[in-house]
């Protein structure tokens, strides 16, 4: 790499782990969860849900379809074996993790811009505690 661009890049393999929602909660709508952060108490999961809709602004080609891929964050409690959906606002995050720890000091000012990084830190901190 360094001979071509002058910059050496890292060639580590990328490992992504996914779960079917049916394995974690049989009553849930079918989707896939990416394991984002893991520990002995809690796991942070990112659910991917796809939708196929009509494009409402294109009146000439009314049959035109639009594909969207949305995601939502959940955490899985290994002790209770429950899957809890997270709402991405500071107060809701503090409330969701209240049974485990007060996380208000862990939520950064840029939470709205980088929720995943902040949630990974919260999960790590809870998993480190005894």
Image (cartoon, rainbow, N blue to C red):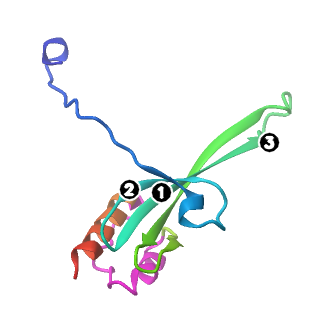
Give the answer, above or below, for where 120 lies relative to 69.
Answer: below
Q: Residues within 10 Å of mark 3 (few under 14, many from 20)?
A: few
The residues bearing labels 3 and 2 have C-alpha atoms spaced at a distance of: 34 Å
Residue beneath the point at 80% across and 34% down: 58
Per the rendered image, the range of residues in magenta is 89-115
Residue beneath the point at 40% across and 74% down: 78
| Between 65 and 18, the one nearer to me in the picture | 18
Q: Which residue in the protein does label 2 denote? A: 36
Residue beneath the point at 85% across and 32% down: 63
Element type where label 2 sits in the image: strand
Q: Which residue in the protein does label 1 denote? A: 46
Q: Residues within 10 Å of mark 1 (few under 14, many from 20)?
A: many
| Between 69 and 130, the one nearer to me in the picture | 130
* Mark before the other along the chain sequence, 3 or 2: 2
Residue 64 is inside the magenta segment: no
Q: Are marks 1 and 2 in contact (CB under 8 Å)?
A: yes
Q: Position of residue 64 (x, y in %)?
A: 79, 31
Q: Which residue in the protein does label 3 denote? A: 56
Q: Position of residue 74 (x, y in %)?
A: 49, 66
Number of marks present in the image shown: 3
Looking at the image, the residue that sits furthest to the top is: 4
* Mark before the other along the chain sequence, 1 or 2: 2
Which is the main secondary structure of the residues drawn in magenta? loop
| Between 91 and 122, the one nearer to me in the picture | 122
Residue 92 is inside the magenta segment: yes
Q: Position of residue 55 (x, y in %)?
A: 77, 39
Residue beneath the point at 22% across and 79% down: 129
Single out the mark in the foreground, 3 or 2. Answer: 2
Quadrant housing the N terminus:
top left
């Amino acid at each position: 790499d360094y001979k071509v661009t002058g910059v050496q890049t890292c060639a580590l393999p990328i490992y992504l782990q996914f779960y079917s929602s049916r394995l974690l909660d049989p009553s849930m709508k079918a989707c896939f969860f990416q394991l984002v952060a893991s520990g002995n108490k809690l796991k942070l999961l990112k659910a991917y849900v796809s939708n196929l809709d009509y494009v409402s602004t294109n009146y000439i080609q009314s049959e035109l379809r639009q594909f969207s891929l949305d995601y939502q964050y959940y955490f899985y409690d290994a002790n209770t074996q429950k899957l809890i959906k997270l709402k991405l606002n500071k107060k809701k995050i503090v409330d969701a993790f209240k049974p485990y720890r007060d996380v208000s000091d862990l939520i950064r000012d840029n939470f709205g811009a980088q929720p995943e990084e902040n949630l990974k830190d919260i999960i790590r901190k809870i998993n480190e505690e005894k």
